Amino acid sequence: MAGAILVTGADGYLGRLLVRRLLDSTDVELILAVRARDRAEMCAKQAGMAATLSGGEGRVRWAAADLVAEHPFADVDPAGVGAILHSAAVTRFNVDEETAQRVNVDGTRRVLAFARRCRRLERVCVVGTVYASGLRAGPIEETALDDSAGFANAYERSKWAAEQLLVRECADLPWRLCRAATVVADDEHGHVTQQNAVHNTLKLLFHGLLSLIPGLPGVPVYCVTGELVVQAVLASLTAPDDARIVHACHTREESLTLGELVDAAFGVFEAEEVFRSRRILRPLFADARSFELLAGAVRGFGAGIVSQAVGSVAPFARQLFVAKALDNRRLRAVLPAYVAPDPKRLVERTCADLVRTRWGAPALERPA
Amino acid sequence: MTPVFVDHVGVALGGRAETVEEAADGGRTRSPAAALREAGFVRHHVCERGESAYVLACRAVQPIRAALAGVGAIVYATCLPHNGNVGSEAAFRDTRDVKHLMDFPASRLQADFGLERAAVFGLSQQACTGTLGALRIAAALLRDEGGIGRALCVTADRFPDGALYEQAYNLVSDGAAACVVSLDQGAFRLLACHAITNGALSLASDDEAVGHYFAYSHRLIEETLAKAGLTIDDIGWVVPQNMNVTAWRIFARLLGIDFERVAFPTLPEAAHVISADNLLNLARITEEGRVQPGERVMLVMSGFGLNWQCVILERT
């Protein structure tokens, strides 16, 4: 790499994993772009990443970059940038349309505009999501997607729209797109340092606050480790043009169904005396309309736990009725050593970690 | 199995009716009035000062007095255990004599209604499901003891002064209900009773109670149907407790039944009458002629404890 690698969202979950891996496996300089309103926030973020950067401090520069600003990379010299890893995004499933547009779409547009100013740029790799495929069922290839099936939430739509910027407007850029599946753990040992809607749902089930979940038990649920996503993103840096888009996921045959995932989780939960003694039953699967009714009914009762519980599941509920068959042939091509983990074991280990820590506050600096 | 019948339902509600807005303004709810209206509640009933649970019980029994001849047992259920004593706490404190804590309403009822032959049984640990527990005990007594013949089942509760009248996001009313369980032919033949208790959740919060509702209610119904040798398609009417109407819109879908077959017509005006809901609703749909001979009616109830109970009846 002729220049430094600019990592957006460097203090985010995937950003940290990418930075750590780049420090460990390359000698390239890194420019860590993080959102910071002022010097104090920047200092706090730098301090928060001290463990991530251990041993690599001399190779790291920082840049305050808010993607919603008109020129987020004003402090970065484009001449020194050889590659960009764009991992910054709002990834909450319940993000509102406006925020999703401003950060995920307009922010990506600004990253790409900056990329055009980088004369030595060899690669700009955008971290996307397999859920940019929206509510499309059936085969999902590692190719450009249309929006004809619609989306479950504004997050998905915004990530699809960001992809469109690459596909339609960036023929002049050496772009790559890595669509990640749902990250459930850092690694195959099931360590969890960043919790998302999946972990929250498991927590609600563990505490008996959700006896109804939306979805069809036979729908595949695509879970991956942060480790796989990092491998896929970094492989994209050197991927050939016929692998512009790769899926950081496992195939349908290598993944659990929703019903199998719930069974695996309860298998772990039921090994816990405190859970077993409460005789919490496995949830019932509700159709989409039933879950909509439930979400609507509890919404009126304010911010109670049930309302929060249902509200956290509702934004991605529609996906749990959509049977996708994700393709990952290009991933396999750029990762020759690819081996899918045992999906049940991954879920079991993840659940065991969550139970052990009782879904404690995210320990972002926990060593791998 | 010896056939047992359920008939002669009487009901009574607390003397003062107020709208959900009045209840909310009076500090008797946690949730806003609009949310409770959205849930289907319009008004509820609270006892006037001096109107005890026992007074409600008598008012529920009075209309069916003519059917009480030969009653050999009274099964008296209360949701709140303190409603199982009409004695004076003050008298106990003054005298330190615990008999003031054992002034039982079932005994009073036996005396006040002249039911000298009736043995009395109190049921106070099944919360809102107590009425269905009373039906089960009455049926078992009738089947096992030849001399009883008929039993009076009663439930009566009023909340203590100052209590919130909202439980698990449902608006509550003070009230009572009574019915006769008999070996003689009656309006409904009792086909099956079933109960599930999860004592580990006895101190469940409202949210936990709601969280467990669907899975446990579903299991309860499946097990009751299996006991009766029936399927859900054999059930003509489901008569649940008066609770958030949307919960049963959802549950009907889970069970695969038409929501039109879920009957809780007293919900808006009566609210959740603690353990009396099933009998209130059963009486209403019977009066309206909605239940045809041969149709089966499933009574479903959940309550703290946590308890779930279900009874299947068949219209004669």
Image (cartoon, coloured by chain):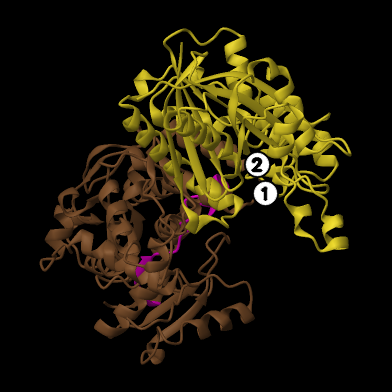
Residue A298, above or below A148:
below
Q: Does residue A260 appear to the left or right of B40 in the view shown?
A: left
- Viewer-side residue, A264 vs B81: B81
Q: Which residues are magenta?
A: A80-103
Assess whether mark 1 and mark 2 are in contact (beta carbons under 8 angstroms): yes
Q: Is residue B274 visible?
A: yes
In the rendering, which numbered label is found on residue A117? none
What percent of the width, then of the height, locates residue B208?
Answer: 54, 52
- The Cα atoms of the two marked residues, 2 and 1, are separated by 6 Å
Of the pair A22 and A50, the residue shown nearer to us: A50
Question: Which residue in the structure is indicated by mark 2?
Answer: B78
Q: Amino acid at mark 1?
A: Pro
Is residue A130 depicted above or below A286 in this figure? Answer: below
Q: Quadrant of the N terminus of chain B?
A: top left
Q: Which residue is mark 1?
A: B81
Return the x and y of residue B238 as percentages of the image width and height. Answer: 48, 23
Q: Amino acid at mark 2?
A: Thr
- Check disc 1 and report its element: helix, strand or loop: helix
